Image (spheres, rainbow, N blue to C red):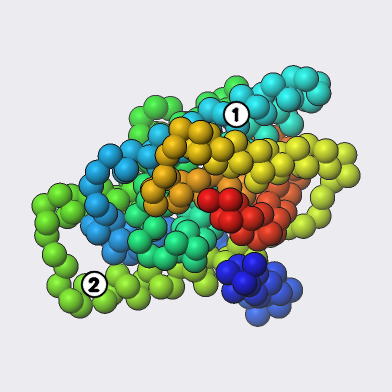
Amino acid sequence: MEAVFPFVILLLIGLVLQYLDIFPKETDKSLNLYVIYVALPALILQQVPKLDFSGSILTPFIMSWLVVVFSGLLVFLLCRLLGWSKEVTGALLLMVPLGNTSFLGIPMVERFFGSSGIPYAILYDQFGSFLALSSYGTLIIAVYGSGATPGIWSLLKRVVLFPPFIALVAALYLRSASIPFPGWLDTLFSMGAASMVPVVMVAIGFQMRLLLPKDELLPLLVGLTLRLGVTPIAFIYGCQFLDLSGKAVQVSLLETAMPPMVTAGAMASIAGLKPGLSSAMAAYGILVSFFTLPYIYDLL
């Protein structure tokens, strides 16, 4: 539990800042933009060139998509069994399979595994969660949501121009070409990367909304149980059964236990898929994960 105390304190700081008039109401958006355009690309450019190219780099990619398929099927079957509405089903199909593997996942991986685990977390997030959000998430909104959805070219443009994705492509090229960074540039990337954790946690705390509609309590409990408990435990025992081990596997398994993605919650709200339920899953999921992640890590 001590490993998550700094995260809890930073989260609480963000919550408190919501109630101070000196901070604009959209402070969290500015902080998130800083992370997307500065801190996360710096972290990627710092860590990915150090990645050891081997069969293990396929692990984050494969496991991230298996999580989407596994948890998506579970949600679909449970929603049909319980007779939940189209809106609730769509919200859970977005919030359960898609985890907060970047803003929360990467700092947590660094906390539990050190900097050597970050490249695998980045691969899990960029080639797994981010691509799933852009493709699978768009499909769910098209089927269950209301309003227009982006076409294929707009979707591809969004992926290609996403700053962390550009940084990932650049980092992979630099790694393959064995191009070293000058000392000053490496220092710059280190400074940018070091700013990510506090900025991310304060931003998450600032944007959290804890009011919960009473009629959505059961879907909330079911969704968080699947996301934070059933899915990671199933994959942990699955990897043990297949005798899979190594840091790439361990980091990927920890990423499967991350709470629902905040961006997926925003997409669900825009599409009219139970905004109250979606935002509550993102907020309460982060709080609950501070208690479940150490337990999942112990299982590893």
- In what quadrant of the picture does the N terminus appear? bottom right
Residue type at the position of mark 2: Asp
Residue 99: percent from the left, percent from the top?
A: 56, 45
Q: Residues within 10 Å of mark 2 (few under 14, many from 20)?
A: some
Disc 1 target residue: 72
- Left or right of 55? Residue 202 is right
Q: Secondary structure at mark 1?
A: helix
Q: Secondary structure at mark 2?
A: helix
Q: Residue at x 70, y 56 (%)?
A: 288
Q: Nearer the viewer, residue 43 or 215?
A: 43
Relative to 26, is 139 above or below?
above
Q: Residue at x 69, y 21 (%)?
A: 77
Relative to 35, is 270 above or below?
above
Residue 33: percent from the left, percent from the top?
A: 46, 61
- What whole-number distance in Å separates the C-alpha atoms at marks 2 and 1? 40 Å
- Left or right of 50? Residue 286 is right
Q: Residue at x 71, y 74 (%)?
A: 16
Relative to 142, is 238 above or below?
below
Residue 178: percent from the left, percent from the top?
A: 12, 56
Q: Which mark is residue 149?
A: none
- Answer yes or no: is residue 62 visible: yes
Residue type at the position of mark 1: Gly
Q: Nearer the viewer, residue 199 or 219?
A: 219
Disc 2 target residue: 186
Residue 156: percent from the left, percent from the top?
A: 35, 34
Q: Please, which residue is most extreme toward the right here?
A: 214
- Left or right of 78? Residue 264 is left
Q: Residue at x 45, y 51 (%)?
A: 251
Relative to 225, is 12 above or below?
below
